[in-house]
Image: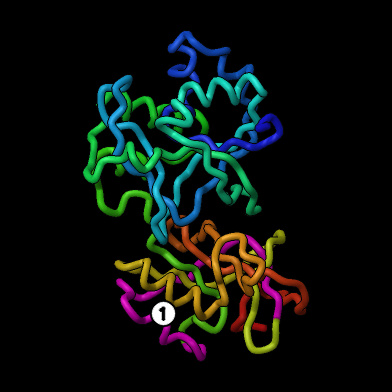
C-alpha cells in the first residue's frame, strides 16, 4: 500500500550506520532512496517515550505552533516500508501518520512519518542515553541537516525546535499601515534582510511568490511566537497548512541579513495574479 508513498524520516532512522548495525534489515542504502531535506511545520521534537531497546528516551514529534522538525524525505522500497514498520514497532509503539511537509525547495507535499501512540507517551521528559542522542546528531549531520532542534530536545529545552523569527515584506514593515501588528511582543527592533522569491503587486499589498529572485523585507523576533503567529495568521488569511481556503501559505524561509542567516516564518501568496515588482522591495515599487 505504501510502496509509492514518500517517507519523512527523523531521529535514529537518519543514521545509516545505526540501521545497518542492528543486523535485522536490508542495508539502508538499498531500501531507502534519499530525496531531499524537508521540515514538518508546527511540530517539535520531543522525548516523552521510553524505548526498552534504546534504554532511555526515543525521539517523537508533537504538534506545537511555531515549531519545525528538520528531517529527510525518502522513497522506500516495499521491503523498506516493512523494515521501517518493524523498526518502529508499528502500529503498537509508533504509528504511521500522514503529514504535510515543506521541502527545502519550497514545495508543500504529503508524506508518511511515524509518531508515538498516545497511550505510550509519558507526561514527562524521558532522558535519552548519550549514545542515542549522539547517533541522532551524527545521522543528521551526515545528511547535511541541522541537529540543533533535536539536540535541544535531548536536554529538555523548552524552546527546542521553535522558530521565533518572522520575515515580513509588505504592509507589516516599519512605516507601513499594519506595522503595529509587529510591535506586540517583539524582542528587539527588526533587521533588514532578503529572502529568495519575487514580489507581486496585489493592489493594496504585495505577495511573495516562489520564483528565482530576491525579496527585501524585515526579520522580527518574538519571545512568544505562538501569539505572534496566531495574530498574523488571521491578518494573512492563513487557515492551516494545506487548506484550500488559504489566502497566504505560512512557510519557512532562509533570510540573509548583514551579519547572519536566519530561518524565519513568512507568508507566501497562495493564488495567481499581480504584477511583478522588479525591485523586490515593496517600498520601492
Position in image of residue 111 (x %, y %): 60, 43
* Residue 151 seen in the figure: no
Which residues make up the magenta segment? 175-201
The quarter of the picture where residue 204 lies is bottom right
Horizontally, is 257 left or right of 273 in the view?
left
Where the C terminus falls, by quadrant?
bottom right
| Number of numbered labels in the structure image | 1
Residue 235 vs 18, above or below: the answer is below
Residue 214 vs 62, above or below: the answer is below
Position in image of residue 225 (x %, y %): 36, 66
* Residue 212 seen in the figure: yes
Instruction: Give whichever of 70, 8 is nearer the camera.
Output: 8
Disc 1 crowd rating (10 Å Cα; few below 14, some 14-19, many 20+) is: many
At 45% across and 69% down in the image, what residue appears?
A: 219
At 32% across and 19% down in the image, what residue appears?
A: 53
At 25% across and 27% down in the image, what residue appears?
A: 56
Horizontally, is 58 left or right of 219 in the view?
left
The quarter of the picture where residue 214 lies is bottom right
Horizontally, is 86 left or right of 128 in the view?
right
Q: Looking at this view, name the residue that lies furthest to the top.
A: 23
Position in image of residue 129 (x %, y %): 25, 26
The quarter of the picture where residue 122 lies is top left
Instruction: Give whichever of 97, 171 is nearer the camera.
Output: 97
Residue 211 vs 229, above or below: the answer is above
Where the N terminus falls, by quadrant?
top right
In terms of secondary structure, where does tag 1 sit? Answer: helix
Q: Which residue is mark 1?
A: 182
Position in image of residue 106 (x %, y %): 63, 54
Magenta span contains residue 80: no
Horizontally, is 160 left or right of 144 in the view?
left
Magenta span contains residue 194: yes
Amino acid at each position: 500500500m505504501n510502496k509509492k508513498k514518500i517517507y519523512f524520516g527523523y531521529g535514529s532512522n537518519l543514521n545509516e550506520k545505526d540501521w545497518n548495525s542492528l543486523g535485522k534489515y536490508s542495508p539502508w542504502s538499498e531500501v531507502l532512496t534519499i530525496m531531499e531535506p524537508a521540515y514538518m511545520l508546527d511540530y517539535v521534537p520531543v522525548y516523552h517515550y521510553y524505548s526498552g531497546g534504546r534504554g532511555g528516551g526515543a525521539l517523537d514529534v508533537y504538534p506545537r505552533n511555531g515549531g519545525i522538525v528538520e528531517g529527510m524525505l525518502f522513497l522506500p522500497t516495499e521491503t523498506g516500508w516493512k523494515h521501517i514498520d518493524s523498526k518502529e514497532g508499528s502500529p503498537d509503539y509508533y504509528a504511521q501518520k500522514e503529514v504535510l511537509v515543506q521541502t527545502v525547495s519550497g514545495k508543500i507535499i504529503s508524506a508518511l512519518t511515524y509518531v508515538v501512540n498516545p497511550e505510550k507517551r509519558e507526561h514527562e521528559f524521558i532522558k535519552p542515553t548519550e549514545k542515542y542522542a549522539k547517533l541522532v546528531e551524527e545521522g543528521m549531520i551526515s545528511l547535511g541537516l541541522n541537529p540543533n532542534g533535536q539536540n535541544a530536545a535531548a536536554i529538555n529545552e523548552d524552546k527546542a525546535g521553535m522558530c521565533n523569527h518572522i520575515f515580513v515584506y509588505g504592509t507589516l514593515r516599519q512605516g507601513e499601515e499594519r506595522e503595529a501588528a509587529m510591535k506586540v511582543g517583539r524582542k528587539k527592533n527588526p533587521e533588514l534582510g532578503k529572502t529568495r522569491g519575487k514580489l507581486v503587486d496585489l493592489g493594496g499589498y504585495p505577495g511573495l511568490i516562489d520564483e528565482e529572485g530576491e525579496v527585501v523585507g524585515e526579520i522580527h523576533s518574538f519571545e512568544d511566537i505562538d501569539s505572534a503567529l496566531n495574530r498574523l495568521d488571521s491578518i494573512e488569511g492563513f487557515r492551516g497548512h494545506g487548506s484550500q481556503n488559504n489566502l497566504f501559505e505560512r512557510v519557512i524561509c532562509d533570510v540573509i541579513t548583514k551579519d547572519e542567516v536566519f530561518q524565519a516564518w513568512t507568508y507566501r501568496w497562495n493564488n495567481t495574479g499581480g504584477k511583478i515588482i522588479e525591485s523586490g522591495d515593496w517600498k520601492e515599487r
